[in-house]
Image (cartoon, grey):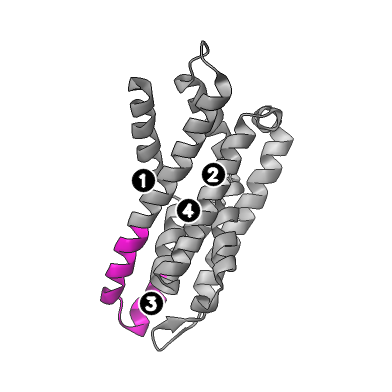
Amino acid sequence: MESYLIYIGVAITTILLPGPAVMLTINNSIQKGLLKSFAGILGISLAILLVAIISATSLGVVLASSAVAFNIIKIAGSVYLIYLGIKMLRSEVTNNITKEQEGSFLKCFMDGFLVSVSNPKAVIFFMSIFPQFIDLTQEYTQQFILLAATFSFLVIVIHTIYAVFAFYAKSRLSSRNDNAILNKISGGVFISFGVGLAASGK
């Protein structure tokens, strides 16, 4: 139980750190509304759960050991982040409503899913952290499911908090100019994340 509580602390700290998924949740909440931001959060959480599962399989070992496989996924992820950034930079604002608000729940879900699942470093993260909290004298599968499900659940909780705060902060961004500035900042951040991911190593 003590090690599990430590794991929760590590997971919370990791999820709280600003990254592409957090920025997407905040941007969705402000630009598309609270309900659509929840669709994105579910996409992020499901992707994280999938990545955690991959990290426990032979595919995770391949991604961790093969530079080619790692780089393919890394480049794909960086291209997608840059694509999202350019979309935000180019989105038009009319009467305080951006055209991005027209996106469907499925589109928000897929954006969240793709942002998280296309980051190969997440596999490396889970492969490095899970062994620290798994008791080899106990049954492996149940422990793994608990750790993966806990992380995914915490993603939903913490991103929901981000989304709610961002939604209520939206009232301070009441002008067309404020929304345009937010789009440019968010777009620039996503492009920076994409370039940073492409330039990074394992």
Rendered view: 37 above or below 95? above
Quadrant where the image shows the N terminus: top left
Q: CA distance from mark 4 to mark 2?
A: 10 Å
From the top left corner, tell me how far across and down residue 122 is, in percent. Answer: 55, 39
Residue at which label 4 appears = 21
Rendered view: 12 above or below 163? above
Residue at which label 1 appears = 16
Sequence-earlier tag: 1 or 3? 1
Circles 1 and 2 in contact, beta carbons < 8 Å = no
Identify which amino acid the numbered label 2 is placed on: Ile
Residue at which label 2 appears = 48
Residue at the far right in the pictured view:
68
Sequence-earlier tag: 4 or 2? 4
Disc 1 crowd rating (10 Å Cα; few below 14, some 14-19, many 20+) is some
Q: Secondary structure at mark 4?
A: helix
Sequence-earlier tag: 1 or 2? 1
On the question of residue 192 being in view, the answer is no
Check residue 54 for magenta coloring. Answer: no
Identify which amino acid the numbered label 4 is placed on: Ala
Rendered view: 68 above or below 143? below
Circles 1 and 4 in contact, beta carbons < 8 Å = no
Residue 119 falls in which quadrant of the image?
Answer: top right
User: Start and end of the magenta stretch?
Assistant: 162-182
Q: CA distance from mark 3 to mark 4?
A: 20 Å
Please tell me whether mark 1 or mark 3 is closer to you in this view: 1
